[in-house]
DNA sequence: AATCTGAGTGAACGGCGTTAACTATCGCAA
DNA sequence: TTGCGATAGTTAACGCCGTTCACTCAGATT
């Protein structure tokens, strides 16, 4: 915990400069444009120097992906914290923040949620189940949903139906957050897959032929989901309140 | 059409050999492994020869993607045709066929539905809205859904609610299949985004931390969706009946 | 039989990730 | 203050890659 030495400060500064360069290339030129030589060029260095900081290009990209997960997660947490105490309002704000970040950062979204590159695949599989990026990510959504359940239980399929259809296959999810009720686990998964599908299709331009202004579809689907939960009386806060 | 000349036959044979080689590399080594030189090597040729058949690597990959769309579509059509006359059974079989193909062809799925590569982006945007691959693809699902609606209308949100929330933003979809009722258009989109989200998350390994046997989740979600449509009395044909 | 077209080759250019050998500089200890 | 070891950087090289260009040569056309 002592103050970092000068060497360490310079090192971390260089590391972030490298990662920033990689991200800039990702955003401006797509994933193909991310190359050690281009990053080094932008920094006024030569490519092999980067190997002092990352063992390979893949490792660098994996590090960038990790940072992006953190950035997205704290964006969503900020939206939650600015949305009052009602869990429903928090969930709405978080979903909007997720979409908003994704739509404004399509290249980054593609890196995190698109087809897994062989290199990133190792990254995703590498971290244990506990702090799988998706798990740490899901936890953010799971908490308010659990709060909501405990305050005013929402409508779900009967637990015996869930159990009959899914058996104990939700156990990984239930245990990862401390014995969540199976109804909450199911609703979490149902909501997360719908949120993901909607946003991914929009970002990946899979909806343009069918619908103008995908945001309207997003808002509509969110409203429908809330209807299904039986919390339709809840006033839907205006869109755009999440950055 | 007159019989193709010998030259033409050889040419199309070479074209398919090139595309087959590209796909083999895609499957065995991921998208990064697809290279003109590797394809040519496997064929006992040199790389520049391929330029007699495709103007660039990107164009070749786009052609492969087009073929994959066709393959997936006819797989789904085959499942529909083998599922009897009931639209519900057809839709179930088609959804299962979609998941099945995707799970057994993850690399191909990633190419079609993952993050758009700059090159493929041009391909997707290039074809007019009418025969956008996604549109031609969606049409396959739209028809049985429309049949179902006309035989035994399913439960949807009230059309005025749909209209209030979505306005006329579904018009592209409605017009692309000849004046579909707005309830059908909405249900189509809701179902397609859920199907896509579920399958994409499974193929992209975004669910492993939460659930074992994603197929069970898929079956469960499909059942829940049918429940919502109010066609729960429909017997759910056993899984695995679609190849 | 002469000609033309199309398929394929080889060499080359520039860019890429990565490795190896080497140099210079910075921070610390004697 | 001097010396030394770690550290950050260099250059050169290897083998990939997409792509272009000039060329050859067999097969179809006239």
Image: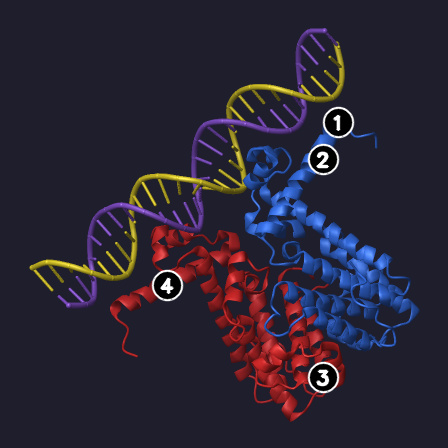
Chain colours: A blue, B red, C yellow, D purple
Gap in Å between the C-alphas at discs 3 and 1?
65 Å
* Same-chain check, marks 1 and 4: no
Gap in Å between the C-alphas at discs 1 and 2?
10 Å
Residue B126 image position (x, y, % from top left): 50, 66
For label 1, the residue is A6
**B159 in relation to A83, above or below:** below
Question: Measuring 28% from the left and 73% from the top, which residue is drawn there?
Answer: B4
> Where the C terminus of chain B falls, by quadrant?
bottom right
- Element under disc 4: helix
* Same-chain check, marks 3 and 1: no
Q: Nearer the viewer, residue A237 or B202?
A: A237
Give the label, 3 or 2, closer to the camera: 2
Q: Nearer the viewer, residue A124 or B37?
A: B37
- Element under disc 2: helix
The crowding category of the residue bearing disc 2, from other C-alpha atoms within 10 Å (few below 14, some 14 to 19, many at least 20), is few
Position of residue A219 in the picture relative to residue B96 (left or right): right
Q: Is residue B30 visible?
A: no
Question: Measuring 77% from the left and 27% from the top, which residue is drawn there?
Answer: A5
User: In the rendered structure, which disc, 1 or 2, sits on the residue that comes first in sequence?
Assistant: 1
- Chain identity of mark 1: A
For label 4, the residue is B15
For label 2, the residue is A12
């Amino acid at each position: 915990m002592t103050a970092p030495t000068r060497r360490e400060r310079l090192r971390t500064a260089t590391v972030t400069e490298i990662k920033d360069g990689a991200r800039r290339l990702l955003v401006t030129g797509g994933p193909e444009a991310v190359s050690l030589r281009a990053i080094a060029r932008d920094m006024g260095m030569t490519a092999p120097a980067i190997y002092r900081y990352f063992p390979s290009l893949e490792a660098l990209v994996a590090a960038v992906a990790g940072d992006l997960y953190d950035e997205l997660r704290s964006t969503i947490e900020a939206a939650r914290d600015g949305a009052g105490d009602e869990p429903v309002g928090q969930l709405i704000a978080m979903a909007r923040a997720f979409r908003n970040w994704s739509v404004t950062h399509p290249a980054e979204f593609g890196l995190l949620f698109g087809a897994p590159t062989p290199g990133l695949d190792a990254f995703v599989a590498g971290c244990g189940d506990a702090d799988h990026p998706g798990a740490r990510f899901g936890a953010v959504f799971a908490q308010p949903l659990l709060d909501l359940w405990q305050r005013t239980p929402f409508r779900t399929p009967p637990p015996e139906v869930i159990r009959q259809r899914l058996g104990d296959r939700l156990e990984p999810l239930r245990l990862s957050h401390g014995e969540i009720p199976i109804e909450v686990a199911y609703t979490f998964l149902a909501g997360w897959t719908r949120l993901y599908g909607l946003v991914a299709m929009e970002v990946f331009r899979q909806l343009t032929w069918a619908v103008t202004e995908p945001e309207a579809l997003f808002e509509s689907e969110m409203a429908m989901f809330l209807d299904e939960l039986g919390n339709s009386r809840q006033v839907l806060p205006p869109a755009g309140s999440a950055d």
